[in-house]
Amino acid sequence: STLLKPLYTSLAQQQLFLLHGGQLARMQGGVFKPTEASESLRLLFRGLFPMFACPSALLQEFKAAGVQDVSEITPERVRRRLKKDPKAVDACAAHFRGDRAPDLVPFITDALEYCLLDLSARGSQTYRELGGVKLLPMSGGQLLCFPFEAFVATEEEQRLVPSLRASFVDPRCSDRLRQWFTAPDFLQALSLRRFTPAVLSANLGAVLPCHFKGQPMVPAYSSQDASGLPPPRWLHDLWTFVGPDNAHLFNAWPVVPLTTGALASVSALSNVLNLPPAIPAAVGPPGPGPVDPLPLFPFGDEAPEGSAGGAGSGEHSEFVQSHPVATGLQRLGCPVVYP
């Protein structure tokens, strides 16, 4: 390399390197795509820097020969340029229209991942270096600058409060970059928050009718007019997300499904019957004949393909519909929690 250095140094000073615009430049007059960057980022880099059309391996060859007078792209340099010119991202986004629209968020995610490469192990202070960088894709379709007060949630969690769509980070980005979007220091530095049962509880007024709040029990799905209510499956998804440990957060709202399609609040659970999963079969003399199974409101029957299916199809549901004790209590008007 010592013998070749004078030759490579001389070549680097010649206008021999082809730019994407068709011009020739010295090596110092342009940049190569970093090897660690996604191929999709050529579009962004060409908008920020004079970009060589030559293979990136050429840069490594010159550096191996000892030539240091080269211009390189780095995550820090890209962040700095994006802060100065947020419209550079908009110009790239304009290429993702029509049939290419679904590719925009993956492209933005590639760019954000590259900008994070040198921040991963340097602590919360440096995450603030993303401030002013327009690489935050939202589920509502917006493209925003960091920092922004937004919620981080999975696609399934976001469906629990559709009206907050514009306040959620696009899950295609946050799921792929979960290494950062689940890190407390990253979230705190950029004003992001995890979507939690407490957040859901605070926003139930955007999903359920406001007059439900404070009611111990409402007819809900058992009434003839169930307009304005979320799909019945929503109750199943809510409790899958919330879990029993956070039930107290919903004391003010009737979100406990009953077998009839009515809803009870968590605070009213002492007034309803919540049957345990295992109850012995009825014993004693047989009755006058078989009892017709009681109808069971189909909460959860709209389960997506590949899921566990509606809860109404299980053995416990059949028990609630046909067991003499359970059916007797229901016929007497005792409200029973949906199994």
Image (cartoon, rainbow, N blue to C red):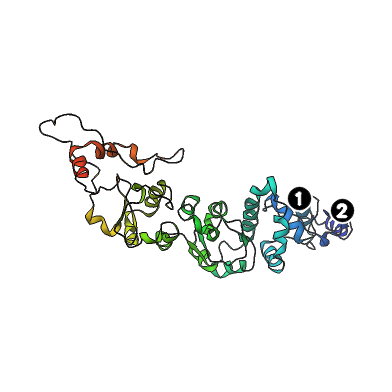
Q: Residue at x 36, y 41 (%)?
A: 298
Q: Residue at x 87, y 61 (%)?
A: 13
User: Which quadrant of the rendered structure holds the C terminus?
Assistant: top left
Q: Position of residue 253 (x, y in %)?
A: 34, 59
Label 1 is placed on what type of residue? Ala
Which residue was labeled with disc 2?
Answer: 22
Above or below: residue 277 compared with residue 216: above
Label 2 is placed on what type of residue? Gly
Helix or strand or loop: what does disc 1 sit on? Answer: helix
Q: Position of residue 119 (x, y in %)?
A: 59, 63
Q: Residue 222 carries which label?
A: none
- Nearest to viewer (mark 2 / mark 1): 2
Neighbour tally class for label 1: few under 14, some 14-19, many 20 plus, Cα within 10 Å: few
Helix or strand or loop: what does disc 2 sit on? Answer: loop
CA gap, disc 2 and disc 1:
20 Å
Q: Where is residue 59 in the image (x, y as percent from the top left)?
A: 77, 54
Which residue was labeled with disc 1?
Answer: 57
| Residue 34 appears left or right of 201 | right
Q: Nearer the viewer, residue 268 or 66?
A: 268
Q: Residue at x 24, y 33 (%)?
A: 292
Above or below: residue 279 compared with residue 270: above
Q: How many marks?
A: 2
Q: Where is residue 233 in the image (x, y as percent from the top left)?
A: 41, 46
| Residue 35 appears left or right of 130 | right
Neighbour tally class for label 2: few under 14, some 14-19, many 20 plus, Cα within 10 Å: few
Q: Which of 13 and 22 is in front in this view?
A: 22
Image quadrant assignment for residue 122: bottom right
| Residue 153 appears left or right of 220 | right
Above or below: residue 171 compared with residue 167: above
| Residue 262 appears left or right of 237 | left
Q: Earlier in the sequence, mark 2 or mark 1?
A: 2
Instruction: State the residue lying farthest toward the top.
Output: 289
